[in-house]
Amino acid sequence: MIIRKMREEDLASVAKIEKMIFTEPWREEDFRKAIGDSNNLYLVAEQAGEIAGYCGYWGIAGEGNIYNVAVKDTFRRKGLGYRMLSELIRRGLDNNISAYTLEVRCSNTSAINLYERLGFINTGIRKDFYNKPKEDAVIMWFRTIQ
């Protein structure tokens, strides 16, 4: 398994995974815009030519807003999410990103547990943040020690 920067040729696979997992998925074009901005960083995990997962942040003023984290069903429960996010944070430091934030559905306890293992802290709730179904989001922050 390798973790590398997302490329244009990955977008169809990434968008397909996104559509399988999320009720309001990003389109291929959304990912194209994300990877086209030098402030952002998007990674994929690849095994034998297959995209197993992806994650990324939008960077601004030393902070990374993590918008996407997904692992294909067949690759879940193997530590891939942890590995991808650890690598995202490590590489973000090279881009002067020292703090990260994200929102996660309140009901997504497995993701919340993953983020907590990485050092993210629950800092609040965004009411009715998600649609399909309507649900609150947990706001989480991670700050690196420099």
Image (tube, rainbow, N blue to C red):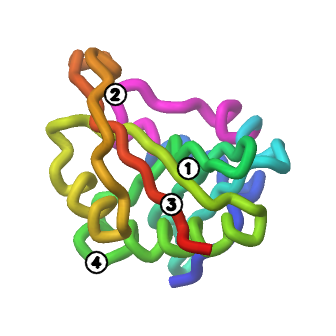
Nearest to the observer: residue 36 or residue 10? 36
The residue identified by callout 2 is: 23
Nearest to the observer: residue 39 or residue 125? 125
Residue 82 falls within the magenta-colored stretch: no
Residue 143 is tagged as: 3
Name the amino acid, label 2.
Thr
The residue identified by callout 1 is: 14
Q: Please indicate whether residue 16 sits to the left or right of residue 2 in the image.
A: left
Q: CA distance from mark 4 to mark 1?
A: 19 Å
Nearest to the observer: residue 30 or residue 49? 30
Overall secondary structure of the magenta section? helix
The residue identified by callout 4 is: 78
Q: CA distance from mark 1 to mark 3?
A: 28 Å
Residue drawn 28% across the image and 37% down it: 138
Tag nearer the camera, 4 or 3? 3
Which class describes the residues within 10 Å of circle 1: few (<14), some (14-19), or many (20+)? many
Residue drawn 39% across the image and 67% down it: 81
Q: Please indicate whether residue 124 sits to the left or right of residue 54 in the image.
A: left
Residues in magenta?
Answer: 18-32
Which sits earlier in the primary sequence, circle 2 or circle 3?
2
Q: Is residue 87 above or below residue 137?
A: below
Kind of element beneath mark 3:
strand
Which sits earlier in the primary sequence, circle 4 or circle 2?
2
Which sits earlier in the primary sequence, circle 2 or circle 1?
1
Q: CA distance from mark 2 to mark 3?
A: 29 Å
